[in-house]
Image (cartoon, helix red, strand yellow):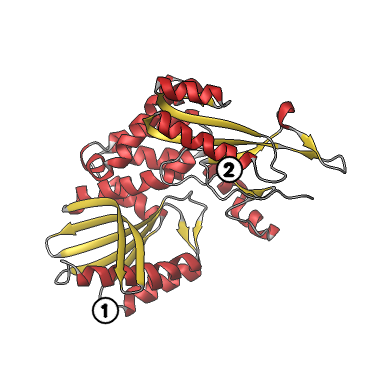
């Protein structure tokens, strides 16, 4: 098997393409696919400068030794006239969410961007938007899967604020530098009520998915300790601090045992957790019926969850003893990694 050199640049989406005009054959006669490479600009307009940068990336990649043929695609809400001319002159396919997925999904994507940029405000005042997003973006295969984690944070944020009160922040990012040490973390849900601060770790999993011992160990030893150090060094040094781990899935026996041990042994701050049934019970007490409907339809009673419960899919997968690479590559190219809010195209 031959491999191609990976370009020293990143793309939103990159994958092999077997379109006829992109195919080549090596000396042994084996087919070498071309590659579709795509840059996506969310919620904005591509001007001539941005298009020139994409064209340059494509030209640099094409100049690498043994590089397969490429099919460059740009996706954005709008293009200036100059950007369109430059893109066409260099063979770039330019598309918009509306032309790719239709009006309904395009509106859903625009709503998603607005929602995630103001997640805390939306979670508190308009939780019905969460259900609307799942409904609108159902037309994209895999979109609900990517949304499940981000929107679970909003569900948790709305629930704890509606029931417990206080102010919340969702997706709060920390970047703290102390000498040579740098600590980075994302606080999924951050709630302040009087002199009490609660930090929620949220995992929007299917009911059959398990939070592993390794995940909990990393959370307790790295994330919790780092956040606690930041909180006590900042304006919250006189506050009661509590950490909670919520998942719509479940915890492995070892992970749950570690959480229980940490909860009993830690005196400086509180530690607690909720699995799927406990989360559902908590959300069921809300006066907002739409959220329990979202949890049931897109988490607890999702078709994949029902299939897994019926055929014990998690056990069957474990029996295969597969070593799954979380970042698969194809012929040396890393597949496009989508971050929070990115939708596979």
Residue that appears at 39% across and 31% down? 109
Does residue 53 appear left or right of residue 272 in this picture?
right
Q: Position of residue 63 (x, y in %)?
A: 64, 41
Residue that appears at 68% across and 35% down? 69
Residue 301 visible? The answer is no
Image height check: is 78 above or below 154? above
Structural crowding at the residue carrying mark 1, measured as other residues with C-alpha within 10 Å and reported as few (<14), some (14–19) or many (≥20): few
Q: Position of residue 71 (x, y in %)?
A: 62, 31
The residue that disc 1 covers is 267
Residue 324 visible? The answer is yes
CB contact under 8 Å: marks 1 and 2: no
Mark toward the start of the polypeptide (1 vs 2): 1
Q: Quadrant of residue 91?
A: top right
Q: Position of residue 211 (x, y in %)?
A: 48, 60
The residue that disc 2 covers is 307
Comparing 78 with 271, the one in front is 78
Does residue 271 appear left or right of residue 194 in this picture?
right
Image height check: is 181 above or below 103? below
Image height check: is 250 above or below 36? below
Does residue 264 appear left or right of residue 2 in this picture?
left
Q: Label 1, label 2: how many angstroms apart (C-alpha)?
A: 42 Å
Q: Secondary structure at mark 1?
A: loop
Q: Quadrant of residue 58?
A: top right
The residue furthest right is: 28
Comparing 153 with 318, the one in front is 153
Structural crowding at the residue carrying mark 2, measured as other residues with C-alpha within 10 Å and reported as few (<14), some (14–19) or many (≥20): few
Comparing 62 with 262, the one in front is 62
């Amino acid at each position: 098997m031959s491999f191609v050199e990976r370009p020293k640049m990143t793309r939103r989406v990159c994958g092999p393409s077997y379109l006829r005009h992109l195919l080549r054959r090596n000396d042994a006669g084996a087919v070498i696919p071309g590659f579709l490479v795509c840059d996506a600009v969310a919620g904005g307009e591509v001007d001539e400068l941005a298009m020139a940068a994409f064209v340059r990336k494509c030209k640099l990649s094409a100049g690498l030794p043994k590089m397969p043929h490429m099919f460059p695609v740009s996706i954005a809400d709008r293009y200036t006239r100059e950007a369109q001319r430059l893109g066409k002159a260099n063979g770039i396919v330019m598309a918009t969410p509306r032309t790719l997925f239709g009006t309904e999904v395009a509106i859903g994507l625009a709503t998603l961007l607005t929602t995630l940029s103001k997640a805390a405000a939306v979670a508190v005042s308009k939780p019905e938007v969460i259900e609307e997003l799942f409904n609108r973006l159902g037309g994209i295969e895999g979109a609900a899967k990517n949304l499940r984690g981000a929107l679970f944070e909003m569900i948790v944020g709305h629930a704890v604020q509606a029931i417990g009160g206080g102010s919340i922040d969702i997706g709060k990012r920390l970047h703290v530098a102390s000498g040579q040490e740098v600590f980075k973390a994302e606080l999924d849900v951050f709630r302040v009520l009087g002199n009490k601060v609660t930090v929620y770790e949220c995992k929007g999993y299917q009911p059959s998915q398990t939070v592993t011992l390794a995940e909990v160990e990393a959370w307790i030893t790295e994330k919790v300790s780092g956040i606690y150090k930041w909180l006590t060094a900042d304006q919250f040094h006189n506050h009661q601090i509590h950490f909670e781990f919520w998942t719509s899935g479940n915890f492995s026996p070892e992970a749950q045992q570690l959480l229980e041990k940490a909860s009993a042994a830690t005196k400086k701050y509180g530690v607690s957790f909720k699995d799927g049934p406990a989360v559902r019970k908590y959300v069921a007490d809300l006066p907002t019926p739409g959220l329990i409907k979202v949890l049931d339809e897109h988490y607890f009673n999702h078709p994949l969850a029902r299939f897994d419960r019926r055929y014990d899919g998690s056990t069957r997968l474990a029996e295969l003893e597969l070593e799954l690479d979380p970042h698969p590559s194809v012929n040396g190219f890393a597949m496009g990694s989508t971050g929070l809010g990115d939708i596979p195209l």
